[in-house]
Amino acid sequence: MNSIRSITEGAILTALYSILLLAVLFIPLIGSLFLFILPVPFVIYVTRHTLKKGLLMLTVALFITYMVGSIATLPITLMFGTTGLIMGYIYSLKKGAYAILLSGSLGFIANFVLLFIVTNVFFHINFIEDTKKMMYQSMETAEKMVTSLGQPTDQFEMMYQSIEMISYIVPSAMVITSIVLAFVTQFFANQILKRFKYEIKSFPPIRKWSFPKSLLWYYLIVTIIFMTGPEQGTILFTIIINLFIVLEIIMTIQGFSFIFFYFHINKKPLTIPVVIVILSLFMTFLLSIIRILGIIDLGFNLRKRMKDPQ
C-alpha cells in the first residue's frame, strides 16, 4: 500500500514540477516567479518518503525536462531538484529551521559554482563576461543617443564603473541569491507540510532575530579596509567588497529586526514596521538609517534595555 502511495505521489509531484518548469520556460516575466518554488515538489516527496525514492523522481524529472525543453534546460532541473532533495532530507531528519535554510543555501551555492565551472570549461561560455558585454553595448548605444542630442554624458562614466564591478561581486551575489531561493522554498514547503500534519520548526518572529555581536567587529574592520581603497583587480579587493556587501545586508536585517521589536513592545500595529521595510527598499537614505539602527542595536544591546512582553 505504501509503495503504491509513494508511486502515486511521485507521479503527481513530478507532474506538478513539469507544469512549473513549463511556466518558467514559456511564460515571460510571470513564469520566472515560479522559479522560486521549483524545488518544493522534491522537498515534499523526500520528506514524506525517502531520499532514494527522491533520486528516482529526479531522474524522471530530468527525462521530462529534456523532452519538453532541450539539453540546455537540464541544469535547471539538476540545480533545483538536487537542492530540493537535500532540503527534503534535512526535513525528514526533523532538524530546525536554520539547519534547513543552511542546507538549501549550500545546495544552491554548490550548484551555481558547478554550473559556472562546467559552462566555462566544457562549453567556453562565461555568463558574467557575456552579461557585461551586453550591458556595455546598451550603454554605448544610449551614450551615442544622448551625445547626438547635445546633452552631457558625464553620468555614463559612473555607469561603466558599475558594470565593471559585476565581475567582483559575483560571490556575494551568488550567496545572497542562494539564501533567498532557499528561504522562499522553505516558506512554501512549510505551508504544504503543515497541511499534511507535519510538525514544522519555524523561524522565530523577526523581532527576535539577532546576529552574533562579533559580526559588528568584522563589519568595522572590513569597512576600514574598504575605505582605505584596496587596488581594484586584486584578490584583496574582491574579498573585501564581497564581505562588505554581505555584512551590510546583515546589519540592515538587524535593523529591520529592531524596528519590529520596537513597535511590538510599544504595542503598535504590525503594518507600521512592514510599511517602513517596504519603503526602505525604495528609499536609500531610509535604508541607511535602518542599517545604523542595526549597528547600534548590535553594539549596545538596545533590546536588553527594553522589556519585551510575550
Image (tube, rainbow, N blue to C red):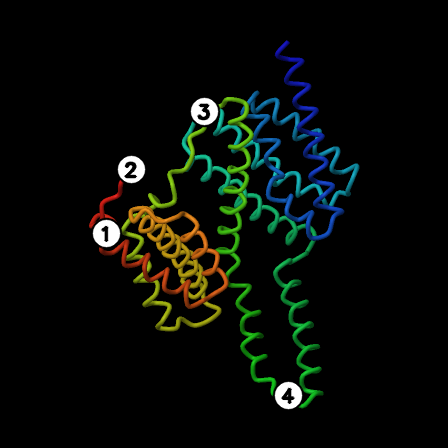
Name the residue carrying label 2.
310
Amino acid under label 1? Asn
| Nearest to the observer: residue 93 or residue 240 | 93
| Nearest to the observer: residue 260 or residue 147 | 260
Within 10 Å of disc 3 (Cα), the crowding (few <14, some 14-19, many 20+) is: few
In which quadrant of the rendered view does residue 43 lie? top right
Residue 1 x/y as whole percent:
64, 9
Mark 3 → mark 2, Cα distance in angstroms: 23 Å
Mark 2 → mark 1, Cα distance in angstroms: 19 Å
Name the residue carrying label 4.
151
Q: Earlier in the sequence, mark 1 or mark 4?
A: 4
Q: Earlier in the sequence, mark 4 or mark 2?
A: 4
| Nearest to the observer: residue 21 or residue 274 | 274
Mark 4 → mark 2, Cα distance in angstroms: 60 Å
Is 1 located above or below residue 280 in the figure? above
Amino acid under label 2? Gln
Residue 145 x/y as whole percent:
71, 82
Q: Earlier in the sequence, mark 3 or mark 2?
A: 3
Q: Residue at x 53, y 67 (%)?
A: 165
Name the residue carrying label 3.
199
Q: Residue at x 50, y 61 (%)?
A: 169
Q: Are marks 1 and 3 in contact (CB under 8 Å)?
A: no
Q: Which mark is residue 301?
A: 1
